[in-house]
Amino acid sequence: MWFYTVLLIFVLLGLAGVVFLGGVYTLVLVPLLVIVLVSAAAYMLWARSMAGSAGAETEASHTADRPLPRRSPRQPTRTPSTPEGLADARLESARTTEE
C-alpha cells in the first residue's frame, strides 16, 4: 500500500511540473513516473502468474448462498464485574476459608 502513496506523490509532482514549472522538473519527473508505472504493471503481472503457478486462486470464487451460522449466546462469567459483586465475593470467600 505504501507504493500508491509514492506513486501519488510522483503524479502530483509531475502534474505540477508540467503545468507550473516545466523544464528540468518535467524532464526528470515524467520519465520517472513512466518507469514507475511500467515496473508496477510488470510486477503485478509477474506476481499474479507466480501465484497461479503456486496453486493459488487467480479468479474470484463463488461463496455459498446459505446464511452464516448463528453463534450460541455466551455463557455468563462466574467472575463478578460490579464493585458490589466483588465485595460480596470477597466476603463469601472469607467465610468459606474460616470454616
Image (spheres, rainbow, N blue to C red):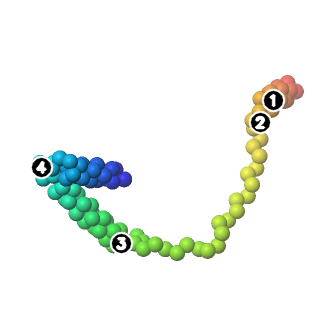
Badge 4 is on which residue? 23
| Residue in the image at 36% along x and 53% along y | 1
User: Which mark, residue 52?
Assistant: 3
Using the image as rendered, state which of residue 14 and residue 97 is in the foreground.
14
Asked which secondary structure carries label 1, the reply is: helix
Q: Tell me if residue 48 comes above or below residue 86 in the rendering.
A: below
| Residue in the image at 33% along x and 50% along y | 5
| Residue in the image at 86% along x and 26% along y | 95
Using the image as rendered, state which of residue 61 and residue 20 is in the foreground.
20
The amino acid beneath tag 3 is Gly
Q: Which of marks 3 and 2 is nearer the N terminus?
A: 3
Q: Which of marks 3 and 1 is nearer the N terminus?
A: 3
Badge 1 is on which residue? 84
Outermost residue, front direction?
20
Using the image as rendered, state which of residue 58 and residue 26 is in the foreground.
26
x, y percentage for residue 7?
A: 29, 53
Q: Which of marks 3 and 4 is nearer the N terminus?
A: 4
Which quadrant would the C terminus be assigned to in this image? top right
Q: Do the residues labelled 1 and 2 touch (CB within 8 Å)?
A: yes
The amino acid beneath tag 1 is Glu
The amino acid beneath tag 2 is Pro
Classed neighbour count for the residue bearing mark 1: other residues with Cα under 10 Å, few (<14), some (14–19), many (≥20): few
- Tag in front: 3 or 4: 4
x, y percentage for residue 60?
A: 46, 72
Badge 2 is on which residue? 80
